[in-house]
Image: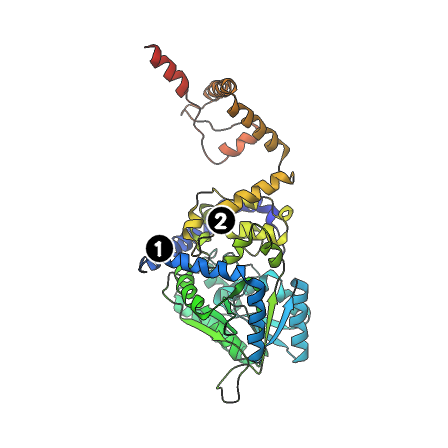
Amino acid sequence: MENHANQFLANAETALHNDTLQIALDRGTTRAVNNRINAMGETTDAYALRQQGRAARLRALHRLPELLEQLEANLTKRGVTVLWAIDADECNRHVLDIAHKHNVHKAIKSKSMATEEVKLNDALETSGIEVVESDLGEFIVQIAHDHPSHIVFPIIHKTKEQVRDLFMDKLHMPPSDDPQVITAAARVHMRQKFIDADMGITGANFAIAETGHLVTVSNEGNARMTSSLPRVHVAVVGIEKVIATLEDFTTLVQLLPRSATGQRMTSYTHLFGGPAHPTDPDGPEHQYVILLDNGRSRIHATEYAEVLACIRCGACLNTCPVYQNVGGHSYGWVYPGPIGAIVTPLLTGIHNATPLPHASSLCGSCKSACPVDIDIPNMLLRLRGDLVEEHDTPMVLTIGLKGWSMAMQSPALYEMSGRAASLASNAIKGRDGNLHNLPGMLGNWTQNRDFPPFAPKSFRQQWRERKKE
């Protein structure tokens, strides 16, 4: 999808006034947060498990070049053709070349943020190849001509009633509010698409260097079918998905489902590596793995390398008060929420996503929820600093902060400004004692909320008066 991150403020304003969206977000995020808390609470020591997961991811990032070479070697031994893609264009060219080589006319995909990032669907459809999303949420997004709004729950922004109406229109489903009837309609439509597909396209949740296996986790079984039913399977995998050992995988696979969906394990955990052998009951005739960079190695060389440890669970989105209110589409690109507010500026350029580092209250809830303990608030602060250093902040804000800094460093100026604010705010307060329409940029505060006036007397004034008594 195109990057519209610089439209965050306008998008957020629209989202806040969308009552249907607010209902959907409240339902979805509340349920996800509670499920994660309950699932993590079942572990013997959730903190220790998180630290083990963090160590596994950081070890992999520390040895990234070495592990990628090991992964390539072990995949190749298994009969997989490994290709490297420096950017989105090269990735899409690889997939199109594979499709043309194997005379592919129809492709089926399982959920993949990487393919969304490189706009693979657009490239395939432009070349005349039919592409069908097999994940239920992604399928709904596709037939609605929409975009995913969450890393794990693509249609968290939609209500059951909206999905019902969509299926009645697009799939000619009989009227029904029963979730089983709704999902059955998608299942009937999807089965034939699996059978007809010439090529299956997946991502991977992890890539195990030690064994040469890719891992997908799902609750619908669509990733398993996408990688095994078509005669050609292509996996598009970000280079940061590599982990060192099978033992590291056993740690991370305990964290991912608990953090993402509140489950001990997903319904399907699929390890694959290599095309089918003659004795196998199923599996592709040809298997390709495309290792995608697209800016990741650049991030790896910076102080933000830790963000590549993300396992795409979506827990930080669910718990973030900003995301809970504005949803994923407000962020304007593939990766929403707190993690997206870091990843989007780093992958697309900070000037193409200037509002996102500020799209956070810095409450720290995201760090507390992160299964690998990424310091998201600190990185958001550093990105804000980068914007200031590159003079990519409004002049009014720059002048205002300099004035505030001067006042905070001078006791006399501090007291004078406090008295002025008290006199002015109490002079224009409403009958209920609150401020409703502040002038200029200050009006952003009172546009959607009341603001209390400054106290008539400051703490310093009261302290001096009491000392005199």
Three-letter residue code for mark 2: Ile
| Picture layout, residue 60 above or below residue 5 | below
Q: Residue at x 51, y 25 (%)?
A: 408
Q: Quadrant of residue 199?
A: bottom right
In the image, 343 versus 133, the foreground residue is 343
As helix, strand or loop, the secondary structure at mark 2 comes to helix
Asked whether residue 311 is in view, the answer is no
Three-letter residue code for mark 1: Ile
Asked whether residue 181 is in view, the answer is yes
Quarter in which the N terminus is drawn: bottom right
Q: Residue at x 45, y 30 (%)?
A: 451
> Where does residue 318 sit, x and y in percent of width and height?
43, 53
Nearer-N-terminus badge (2/1):
1
> Where does residue 22 sit, x and y in percent of width and height?
45, 49
Can you identify the residue that label 2 sits on? Answer: 376
Q: Quadrant of residue 239?
A: bottom right
Q: Is residue 120 left or right of residue 210?
A: right
> Where does residue 431 sit, x and y in percent of width and height?
42, 23
Query: Mark 2–mark 1 contact, CB under 8 Å?
Result: no
Alpha-carbon neighbours of circle 2 within 10 Å: few (<14), some, or many (≥20)? many
In the image, 435 versus 411, the foreground residue is 411
Can you identify the residue that label 1 sits on? Answer: 37
Q: Residue at x 68, y 66 (%)?
A: 90
In the image, 178 versus 281, the foreground residue is 281
Alpha-carbon neighbours of circle 1 within 10 Å: few (<14), some, or many (≥20)? some
As helix, strand or loop, the secondary structure at mark 1 comes to helix
